[in-house]
Amino acid sequence: MSRVPSPPPPAEMSSGPVAESWCYTQIKVVKFSYMWTINNFSFCREEMGEVIKSSTFSSGANDKLKWCLRVNPKGLDEESKDYLSLYLLLVSCPKAEVRAKFKFSILNAKGEETKAMESQRAYRFVQGKDWGFKKFIRRDFLLDEANGLLPDDKLTLFCEVSVVQDSVNISGQNTMNMVKVPDCRLADELGGLWENSRFTDCSLCVAGQEFQAHKAILAARSPVFSAMFEHEMEESKKNRVEINDVEPEVFKEMMCFIYTDKAPNLDKMADDLLAAADKPCCRSYGDGGLEVHGGIPSSPGSRSLPLAGLGPVPLPGTAPETPQTVLTHIPPPTLLARTGEIPPHHN
């Protein structure tokens, strides 16, 4: 008896669109076979329409469907008198009807299937109803010893039956579509560590103000801090770094970039950030790109800011073709560095 297989994962059903919900319908089919041997076949009744029936059979001990084979050795009627007719008969059935496909064949002297014929669809059976082939095989061909179909005068018929049972629906939902990957909040969460001074392990002294920070983040984002904390320097021993000649507000903006890769106030502090970039302890704050919020106002004597990943972008109010007036790629490890003076702009 066949078993209902597990439904395949929805993604394997098709390489096309994946639906939020799905249904897998399995038509249950019970398959079984039966072999019937008729000894001394040449002594069978020779009258047209005479019938020989096999014993009943089923798919198993608990199957209430009972079947048998029916043979007309000399055909069913005048049209088929030169043939052997073969049918599958439904003997008993607890249901009103049942649908089944079938296949007949003859086993030769070697036990091989020959002269096979099968139904092209599942036929509707009711109790007492049979389906089969009126002209299954010509009698003269069957009786010819050269064909080897009656070894020792035995006719062996082999029947395979496929009974259609109820269909089974298995449904579900595609969990892949139900799971939403949350937006990345790493930058905001790291920025929160800086803003709230949580779990800090070092101090940065800028113009008399103390800022609490995290050595691991500073070392990961700045080769200068990495070397400072890795070696036996005074800053590493005391977990305290002195930074001179940088305004606290400018320093906070640079630290915001170290923690979040963003500089939201860049348009207000462009010149101050450039000046701070020249300080030894303020260089090399990573090689990522600055995220600019708003434009950078141009003025005579102002300098261009290198922003990684943006490519050549003219500063507002400058000529696009002037090489010194573009935002250029950051050559690591320097975050902010001079790329030349912007000449005065004349209207």
Image (cartoon, rainbow, N blue to C red):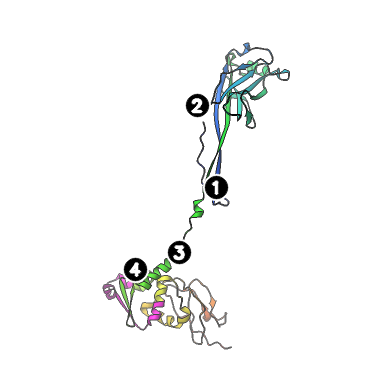
On whether residue 79 falls in the magenta region, the answer is no
Q: Which residues lie in the magenta part?
A: 227-253
Q: Is residue 337 left or right of residue 318?
A: left
Which sits earlier in the primary sequence, circle 3 or circle 4? 3
Identify the residue position indicated by label 1 in the image: 22
Type of amino acid at the residue the image marks with label 1: Trp
Of tags 4 and 1, the one toward the viewer is 1
Q: Is residue 161 left or right of residue 223?
A: right
For mark 4, does the 10 Å Cα neighbourhood hold few (<14), some (14 to 19), or many (20 or more) residues?
some
Of tags 1 and 3, the one toward the viewer is 1
Tell which of 324 and 172 is nearer to you.
172
Identify the residue position indicated by label 2 in the image: 62
Q: Give the Cα distance between marks 3 and 4.
A: 21 Å
Which sits earlier in the primary sequence, circle 2 or circle 3? 2
Task: State if disc 3 and disc 2 touch (CB < 8 Å).
Answer: no
Identify the residue position indicated by label 4 in the image: 216
Type of amino acid at the residue the image marks with label 2: Asn
Identify the residue position indicated by label 3 in the image: 184
